[in-house]
């Protein structure tokens, strides 16, 4: 039952649904096996068409997956369509009910071809539902008693969850990542660089080492494909069934039952087979001359978008690595010096104006607190100023016209993208394409004469090609039209050639298409993959991204356009294509109409847990939790009965998230003690900082009644990166003002003010941090209730409760060893070991005159072992030694194991419970 309880606790604290705009009206469309929720403001015809399309796919995929997975959910699966992100997003949860969230934005950065990308997303997420919903044997029996808290397949390494879904993308969808040149590139490169991960490294999303969160998808998908080929696809289902009916966490016991071997042995064979497979491919590629390049960047990760300055002496690029905040950088090619121009979440390629004075790109940010949208910006290189051109337009991939004061860009809405242009003088926007068939556009590039736009185009059926839009005629004509994945076009400065990246050799390389003669030439031949070509103004140098097992880096090579040799230009008529036509009329197939969403049918509790507790006396009880499909309402109820004094105790929490302010109502009763509060919280969010304001009414009665109001303000712009050992940059503030007053029916008057402020400072050594914080607690009012704050520092030095206190900490934090290894498939993963040297000071504070009394100080050192338990839950083991600097007694050694407190509470100053321990 432990894994179910952990799941329940996590779910109640962290709703998987993002907070939704309260202005949205939600509607429901019912099918035989699904309940589809879609939102809209005003007219919802387009939303209804999208809901019908998705509902049709869901029913079609249900009919294909259920017979293979051999599991049929007992109730309908909820589909929530939320067009709230400008990036591909989807998740599935079986708790408290089977729910899939779908953001219909096209995955333009995923270098994988799909017949239908929405279908592929649904295959992926519905596989999760069928897999995690399974419960056979004892688990199936207990679920009938206790409800949906029994979800044994949830307690698996992440690689097993994602491996199954990636495998089914290919099995059911026909293409998918297992058969993609992109995933083959990543595995091939891991073999080439002798950097093939062991199984223990693939059990979690939370990796700092590249490819980071992609790891369980990549290795899991390829491993499941290996198992299906080595044994059979049915064995994958057999294993899930056996595991869901057995004891969770005994993965290898069930593996031996199904496959005859442990996963460690199977992984060793998988690695040998993969190595042999790609060694043959290396030999094949090496038959032709491998291009020689000069590496310019060494940051790896997701480096993007190299582009030459007109003078050719500089290359601008976007750096996204695991050591720092995403940034725009410039590299001087002549002396290899680089400079950071801007630290922002740049979400599109960077383009440069003809005179080299400006850059344009899109930045991803939170919009109106509820949406994550892309908008277009222009950066003045000379004055280092940034100007925002759009707000909430969902515009990306901008490019300057070389002849007019206009830019081309892509606009996204409801899963549809279209090519647009904007006049920079009048801000007038003209839409050039009007696709209603989910054709997707990306990376538009103006020709040097300004009359044409090259653009990457994806069409249903899985074709992704380069097209040219003629601004004079309005015609859009294909440059390529085949099964290859052709992306990221780039003109030469004379307009004679169009460069692009393609996997037409099963390896991503750079190709050039000569416009006049319609000649296709291969420019690079690499062992890994080449992307995002950029040609210098003299057409003699090519900059591009070259993939390695550390990520992408900018490389440069010399080119001679006159010596490029043409290759066969495969046309769609003579290529091996997968027949795929989409003539389905979704509204005719889905015989259902929309009706207004009602949260209450889904809010009934789906489980209960029996509990027992001993605190000098035995108590027995139970707990349950419920939420509606959109998580507008959540509640947790826990009740106990004391077997000694025969008295009950109850705790209840109801969270309402359907208004701009999140309302939280909590009440508890225990013996003669009653507590309750009602809180309303309003966030103010963007990508760079967090702020919120919370108003709370508190009541507590035991020996006397305390009733009052409190106002809390929180702010943080603190940043933490994948290789960070703790927050390492920025500041945070937490202010709590509480007023208990007889006017509010309180027995005593009391005013409390708690302040915390902290700063994280990067030191010259990478990921070495200086943390400074100050905390203070002040209380005024009736003497009887003034002693509200515990005066305490590390080292078990405690001066008891005081009315007014002040404390400060100075702490130097440093990395010791980066581990990122697990104990095989066991649910314990070690991330890193770090240390800290600290100085704590605290004192009782007198306001008038200002005096310090009962001062206590300590210093010491701590070792922190940061880990993940149950594959995804962060936890830290702290071993410390602290000494009192005043009386110098024997140093105190202490040990603490605790989950890492998420987000704001990860700040040392932000843990509300610490305000009484200064």
Image (cartoon, helix red, strand yellow):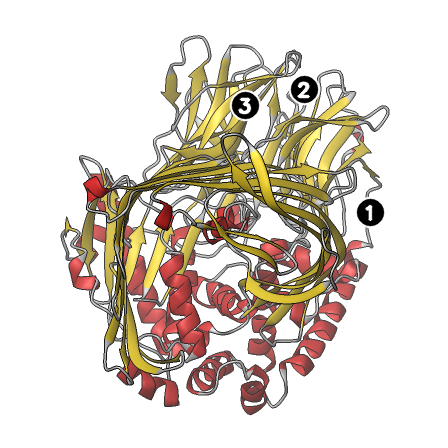
Q: Which mark is residue 529?
A: none
Whole-percent x, y for residue 788 in the image: 43, 50
Q: Which mark is residue 290?
A: 1
Q: Please indicate whether residue 299 sits to the left or right of residue 116 in the image.
A: right
Marks 2/1: CA–CA distance: 26 Å
Whole-percent x, y for residue 27 in the image: 19, 49
Contact check, label 1 and label 3, Cβ < 8 Å: no
Label 2: which secondary element:
loop
Marks 3/2: CA–CA distance: 14 Å
Q: Residues within 10 Å of mark 3 (few under 14, many from 20)?
A: many
Label 3: which secondary element:
strand
Q: Which mark is residue 493?
A: 2
Q: Residues within 10 Å of mark 2 (few under 14, many from 20)?
A: some
Q: Quadrant of residue 758?
A: top right
Q: Which mark is residue 399?
A: 3
* Location of residue 621 with respect to 118 vertically, above or below: below
User: Tag count in the figure?
Assistant: 3
Label 1: which secondary element:
loop
Q: Quadrant of residue 818?
A: bottom right
**Sequence-first disc among 3 and 2:** 3
Instruction: Please say whether residue 214 is visible from this viewpoint.
Output: yes
Marks 1/3: CA–CA distance: 32 Å
């Amino acid at each position: 039952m432990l894994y179910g309880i952990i799941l329940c606790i996590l779910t109640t604290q962290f709703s998987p649904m993002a907070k939704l705009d309260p202005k949205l009206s939600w509607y429901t469309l019912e099918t035989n096996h699904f309940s589809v929720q879609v939102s809209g403001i005003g007219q919802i015809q387009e939303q209804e068409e999208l809901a019908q399309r998705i509902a049709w796919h869901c029913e079609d995929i249900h009919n294909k997956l259920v017979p293979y997975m051999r599991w049929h959910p007992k109730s309908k699966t909820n589909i929530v369509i939320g067009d709230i992100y400008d990036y591909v997003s989807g998740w599935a949860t079986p708790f408290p009910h089977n729910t899939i969230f779908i953001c219909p934005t096209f995955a333009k950065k995923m270098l994988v071809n799909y017949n239908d990308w929405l279908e592929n997303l649904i295959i992926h997420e519905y596989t999760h539902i069928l897999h995690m919903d399974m419960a056979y044997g004892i688990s199936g029996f207990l679920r009938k008693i206790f409800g949906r808290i029994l979800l044994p397949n949830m307690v698996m390494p992440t690689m097993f969850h994602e491996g199954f879904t990636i495998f089914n993308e290919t099995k059911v969808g026909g293409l998918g990542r297992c058969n993609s040149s992109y995933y083959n590139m990543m595995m091939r490169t891991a073999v080439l660089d002798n950097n093939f991960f062991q199984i223990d490294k693939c059990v979690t999303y939370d990796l700092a080492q590249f490819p980071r969160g992609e790891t369980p998808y990549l290795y899991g998908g390829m491993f499941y494909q290996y198992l299906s080929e080595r044994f059979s696809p049915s064995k994958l289902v057999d294993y899930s069934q056996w595991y869901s009916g057995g004891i969770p966490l005994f993965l290898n016991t069930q593996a031996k039952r199904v496959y005859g071997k442990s996963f460690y042995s199977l992984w060793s064979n998988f690695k040998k087979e993969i190595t042999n497979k790609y060694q043959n491919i290396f030999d094949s590629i090496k038959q032709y001359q491998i291009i020689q390049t000069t590496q310019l960047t060494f940051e790896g990760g997701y480096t993007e978008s190299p582009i030459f300055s007109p003078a050719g002496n500089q290359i601008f690029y976007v750096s996204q690595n695991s050591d720092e905040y995403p940034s725009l950088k410039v590299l001087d090619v002549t002396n290899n010096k680089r400079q950071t121009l801007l630290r922002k979440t740049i979400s599109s390629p960077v383009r440069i104006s003809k005179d080299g004075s400006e850059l344009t790109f899109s930045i991803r940010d939170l919009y109106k607190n509820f949406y994550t949208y892309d908008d277009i910006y222009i950066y003045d290189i000379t004055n280092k100023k940034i100007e925002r051109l759009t707000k909430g337009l969902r515009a990306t991939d901008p490019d300057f016209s070389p002849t007019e004061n206009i830019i081309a860009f892509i606009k996204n809405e409801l899963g549809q993208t279209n090519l647009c242009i904007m006049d920079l003088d009048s801000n007038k926007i003209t839409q050039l394409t009007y696709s209603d068939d989910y054709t997707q556009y990306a990376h538009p590039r103006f020709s040097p004469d300004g009359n044409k736009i090259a653009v990457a185009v994806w069409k249903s059926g899985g074709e992704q090609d380069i097209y040219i839009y003629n601004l004079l005629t309005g015609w859009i004509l294909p440059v390529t039209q085949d099964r290859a994945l052709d992306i990221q076009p780039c003109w030469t400065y004379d307009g004679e050639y169009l460069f692009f990246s393609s996997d037409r050799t099963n390896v991503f390389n750079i190709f050039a298409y000569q416009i006049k003669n319609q000649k296709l030439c291969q420019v690079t031949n690499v062992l890994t993959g080449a992307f995002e070509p950029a040609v210098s103004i003299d057409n003699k140098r090519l900059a591009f991204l070259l993939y390695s097992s550390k990520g992408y880096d900018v490389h440069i090579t010399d080119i001679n356009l006159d010596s490029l040799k043409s290759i066969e230009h495969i046309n769609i008529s003579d290529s091996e294509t997968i027949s795929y036509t989409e003539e389905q009329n979704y509204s005719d197939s889905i015989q259902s109409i929309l009706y207004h969403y009602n949260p209450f049918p889904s809010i009934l509790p789906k489980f209960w847990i029996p509990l027992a507790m001993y605190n000098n006396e035995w108590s027995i009880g139970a707990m349950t939790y419920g939420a509606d499909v959109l998580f507008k309402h959540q509640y947790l109820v826990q009740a106990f009965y004391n077997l000694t004094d025969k008295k009950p105790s109850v705790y209840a929490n109801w969270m309402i998230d359907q208004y701009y302010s999140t309302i939280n109502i909590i009440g508890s009763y225990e013996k003669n003690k009653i507590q309750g509060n009602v809180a309303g919280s309003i966030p103010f969010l963007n990508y760079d900082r967090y702020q919120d304001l919370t108003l709370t009414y508190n009541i507590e009665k035991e020996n006397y009644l305390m009733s009052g109001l409190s106002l809390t303000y929180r702010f943080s712009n603190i940043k933490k990166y994948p290789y960070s050992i703790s927050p390492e940059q920025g500041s945070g503030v937490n202010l709590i003002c509480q007023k208990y007053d007889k006017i509010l029916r309180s027995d005593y008057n009391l005013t409390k003010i708690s302040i915390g402020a902290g700063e994280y400072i990067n030191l010259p050594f990478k990921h070495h941090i200086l943390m400074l914080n100050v905390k203070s607690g002040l209380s005024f009012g009736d003497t009887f209730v003034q002693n509200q704050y515990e005066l305490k520092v590390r080292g078990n030095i405690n001066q008891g409760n005081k009315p007014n206190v002040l404390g400060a900490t100075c702490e130097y934090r440093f990395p010791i060893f980066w581990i990122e290894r697990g104990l095989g498939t066991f649910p314990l993963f070690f991330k890193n070991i770090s240390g800290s040297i600290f100085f704590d000071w605290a004192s009782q504070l007198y306001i008038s005159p200002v005096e310090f009394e009962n001062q206590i100080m300590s210093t010491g050192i701590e070792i922190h072992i940061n880990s993940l338990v149950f594959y995804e839950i962060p936890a830290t083991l702290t071993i410390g030694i602290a000494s009192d600097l005043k009386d110098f007694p024997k140093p105190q050694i202490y040990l603490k194991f605790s989950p890492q407190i998420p987000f704001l509470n990860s700040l040392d100053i932000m843990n509300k419970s610490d305000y009484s321990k200064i």
